[in-house]
């Protein structure tokens, strides 16, 4: 429990340069972490710590980069892979082909059952 007397003792020991572990042993009944937490809540942490101002870095200036040029390739796919023209089918032709495939599938299944 942090009473007024214990907080005053804590601040005086901290100002005298005692460590958090030494203060915890001196006060008794509190841990080092409890002492550090109380010092933090009191705003007393960081004694003797000189804060240096942040270094201001100059702003970066974006420089335009050279564009990557693509060299022409010696490999020409059209030399090796020729596409054959695709026959365009109407819906009725596709339906007739599907019906023929289905009929063949049924015939194969029926032949397998009778054998």
Image (cartoon, rainbow, N blue to C red):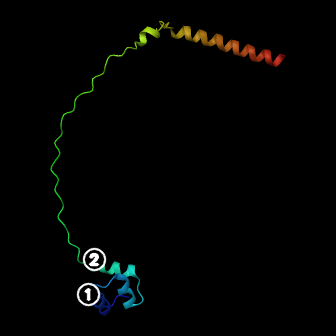
On the image, the x and y values in percent for residue 30 come to: 40, 86
Looking at the image, residue 32 sits to the left or right of residue 97; the answer is left
Q: Is residue 29 visible?
A: yes
Label 2 sits on residue: 45
| Circle number at residue 3 | none
In three-dimensional space, the C-alpha distance between marks 2 and 1, rounded to whole angstroms, equals 13 Å
Q: Which of marks 2 and 1 is nearer the N terminus?
A: 1
Which residue does the image show at 27% across and 86% down from the upper left? Answer: 11
| Circle number at residue 16 | 1
The answer to which image quadrant residue 64 occupies is: top left
Q: Do the residues labelled 2 and 1 touch (CB within 8 Å)?
A: no
Looking at the image, residue 42 sits to the left or right of residue 62; the answer is right
On the image, the x and y values in percent for residue 72 come to: 32, 16
Which residue does the image show at 25% across and 85% down from the upper left? Answer: 15
Which residue does the image show at 32% across and 81% down from the upper left? Answer: 38
Which residue does the image show at 18% across and 66% down from the upper left? Answer: 52
Seen in the picture, residue 22 relative to 54 is either above or below; the reply is below
Looking at the image, residue 60 sits to the left or right of residue 68; the answer is left
Secondary structure category for the residue under label 1: helix
Q: Tag 2: Cα neighbours inside 10 Å, few (<14), some, or many (≥20)?
A: some
């Amino acid at each position: 429990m942090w009473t007024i007397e214990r907080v005053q003792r804590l601040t005086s020991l901290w100002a005298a340069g005692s460590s958090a572990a030494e203060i915890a042993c001196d006060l008794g009944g509190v841990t080092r972490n409890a002492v550090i937490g109380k010092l933090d809540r009191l705003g007393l942490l960081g004694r003797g710590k000189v804060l240096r101002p942040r270094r201001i870095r100059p702003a970066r200036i974006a420089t335009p980069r050279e564009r990557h040029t693509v060299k022409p390739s010696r490999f020409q796919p059209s030399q090796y892979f020729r596409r054959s023209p695709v026959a365009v089918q109407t819906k009725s032709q596709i339906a007739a082909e599907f019906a023929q495939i289905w009929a063949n599938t049924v015939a194969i299944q029926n032949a397998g059952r009778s054998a």
